[in-house]
Amino acid sequence: MARTRGGWIGVPLGVRHALKAHRAARAVFHPAWIPDSLDPTIERLKRFRVVAGAVTSLGVYTYVEGGFAIMELLENALTAAMVLLLLTPLTVGVMLLVWRRTGTVGQLRVPLLNSLKLLLLFIGCVAALVVLGQVIAGSNSQLVVLGVGLVFIWGLWFTGIGAVRVCGNFFGTAAVHRSLPALLATVTSWLTALPDLITGDLHGLGLTLGIVFILGAPVTVTAIALAETRRLKRRYGIRLRTHPANLPPVPGGPPPAPPTGLPHVPPQGNPYGPPHGHPYGPPQGHSPYGPPRGNPYAPPQGNPYGPPHAPRPPHPPQNPYGG
């Protein structure tokens, strides 16, 4: 779906549509400045990367904890979001040092700031949900529980859909470089599992389940991210080490503006008709096959053998009627 570039809201969002959490999340967490996927295969890889990571993490988490506690899950999500606030700028900073060899950092300032805003917006939504959950848990008023509970349910659905969106585009970093979301997803998944790998904490599980719990998400995300970056490189020539300003043009860009000016104005009138009038018609005035004007065989006026301007003898006036 094509979206308008330059703004934040990617789809029309009125008051009625804003009440629908999934539509509001799509507009807010997938803004207009994020480029569309190059082909459906890459989009499917992104979605599978998000779903696989979420299912692996949530499934093992639910098995370990013996249940599904929504508040504990939100608190863990807030902690993970704060970790992202630290890891994402560090990873992007390393790539900026690599890209400085072939381009300038100033060219990427606007998309980088937009990605940071999106990250802070997501963290704010998760923090608001945690606060609303604590208000519900600590209130004895049914009216407060009912009112805040409705807002909490809407916000939970809104943030959940938003989490899927931001994980797919990884906070809009595709606007900086199309291979950057896959790199950030891989780095984040491995750095999240790093403490358990270092300490050997299997969370009370056996060796097999512990390895699945620790390595399941990063291995799955890494495999899909490698497939995504390999396809970008082979089909579109997009390399992660190349500065975004030096990447080849991608298909499906905006069409060139039509030329303007008098040289490009099409000729007026019927192009198959005669230019001015009928080319085989007679010229205006008289027929070309008729005699010329006047009698060409009539004798010239006056005596051609007489002296020029000879004086005529005088004649007395006569009566034309005789008598």
Image (cartoon, rainbow, N blue to C red):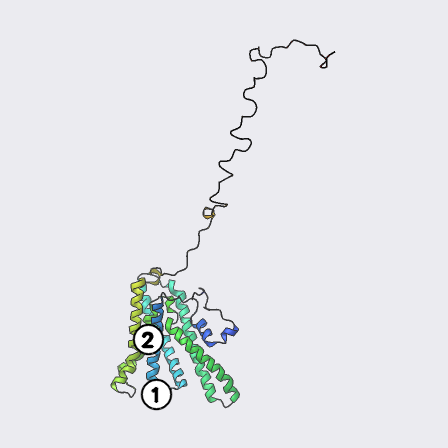
Nearest to the observer: residue 109 or residue 190: 190
Mark identifier at residue 65: 1
First in sequence: mark 1 vs mark 2: 1
Label 1 or label 2, whichever lies nearer to me, is: 1
**Eyeballing the image, is 145 above or below 276?**
below
Nearest to the observer: residue 153 or residue 118: 153
Which residue bears the numbered disc 2? 188
Q: Residues within 10 Å of mark 2 (few under 14, many from 20)?
A: some
**Eyeballing the image, is 180 above or below 194?**
above
Residue 182 location, quadrant? bottom left
Nearest to the observer: residue 259 or residue 140: 259
Work out how far the residue at label 1 is from the one at label 2, CA to CA, in angstroms. Answer: 23 Å
Q: As drawn, is 299 to the left or to the right of 77?
A: right
Q: Which amino acid is tagged 1? A: Glu
Q: Which amino acid is tagged 2? A: Thr
Q: As drawn, is 9 to the left or to the right of 108?
A: right
Taking the image as drawn, is residue 150 in sight? Answer: yes
Quarter of the image with the C terminus in it: top right
Residue 132 lies, in percent from the top left, at 46, 83
Residue 166 lies, in percent from the top left, at 39, 73
Quarter of the image with the N terminus in it: bottom left
